[in-house]
Image (tube, rainbow, N blue to C red):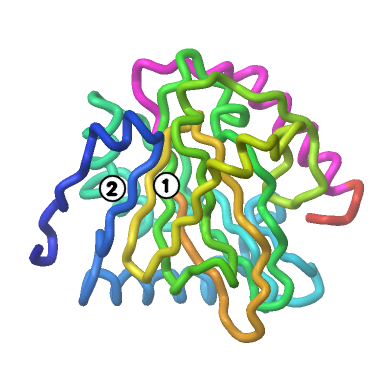
Amino acid sequence: MTAGQQPEISLCQFQSEGFVAVPQFLRGEELAELQRHVNRFITQIVPDLPSEDVFYEDRTNRDSLKQIQRMGHHDPWFHRLFTSGRFRMLAETLLQGPVTPRNLQYFNKPARMGQPTPAHQDGFYFMLDPCDAVTMWFALDRVDEENGCVRYIPGSHRRGMRPHARTNTLGFSQGIVDYPTEEDRVREFPVPASPGDLLVHDAMTIHRADGNRSHDRSRRALGFVYYSQRAREDLAAHQEYQQRLKAELKSAGRI
């Protein structure tokens, strides 16, 4: 595969398993350029972002950067990356129709302090009817079981929404109440990744990640969220939830 080509994707696997891994979705100069712009964004843009769009494991430690929201809203380069080109084309292939770019995020689990991500289904946050959406997880670092690779439950997107409740995890405010069941333990599937690899999952697919147990390795990634244009978002409920969550986090001193 040469730079700029769209890799072959198994639509059947995505529909059956609820996720698909695409090795080296970007590589070479394309990957290097993306890495440069991530570093630029963190250095130049993050210091001026509103508190609700940037999270730290420790607010007093700038090296503990954990999550950035709405990168495409805050920077034209990331807006283009998100709204046109290969990521959006892949979303339209997997959702089999036009999509709405919804959010571009940065995720990190800093060495020795990155916390676990609770098991959840993205669709619970999205509040869509029907719940037709995908999340893409693009690796910026080598990610394995030691520093917190994504873990999926294959086929869980076809079993409906599990009950969720409030968690204390900053950036992941809802988690599945009864996770893990014995079946979850048996079926859970870790997916390591290398820089440039892309994981894509259905909004109903159950997934989680451990914390970063490594001593010197970050666990950085970008997250791309696309909604099918068939889906309708409950905007009032979503806005109400976001406002309530923001107020709670500010009251607790976490943003």
Q: Quadrant of residue 135?
A: top left
Label 2 Cα neighbours within 10 Å, binned few <14 / some 14-19 / many ≥20: many
Query: Bounds of the magenta span?
Result: 226-250
Three-letter code for the amino acid on which mark 2 is drawn = Phe
Residue 185 location (% of width, % of height):
63, 44
Residue 147 location (% of width, % of height):
59, 70
Q: Earlier in the sequence, mark 2 or mark 1?
A: 2
Which residue corresponds to the image point at 70% horizontal and 34% vertical from the top-left? 176
Marker disc for residue 87: 2
Residue 132 location (% of width, % of height):
41, 23
Which quadrant, please, contains the C terminus?
bottom right
Which quadrant, please, contains the N terminus?
bottom left
Secondary structure beneath dot 1 equals strand
Residue 110 location (% of width, % of height):
64, 73
Secondary structure beneath dot 2 equals helix
Q: Is residue 237 magenta?
A: yes
Residue corresponding to mark 1 = 224
Residue nearest the viewer, comparing 249 with 12:
12
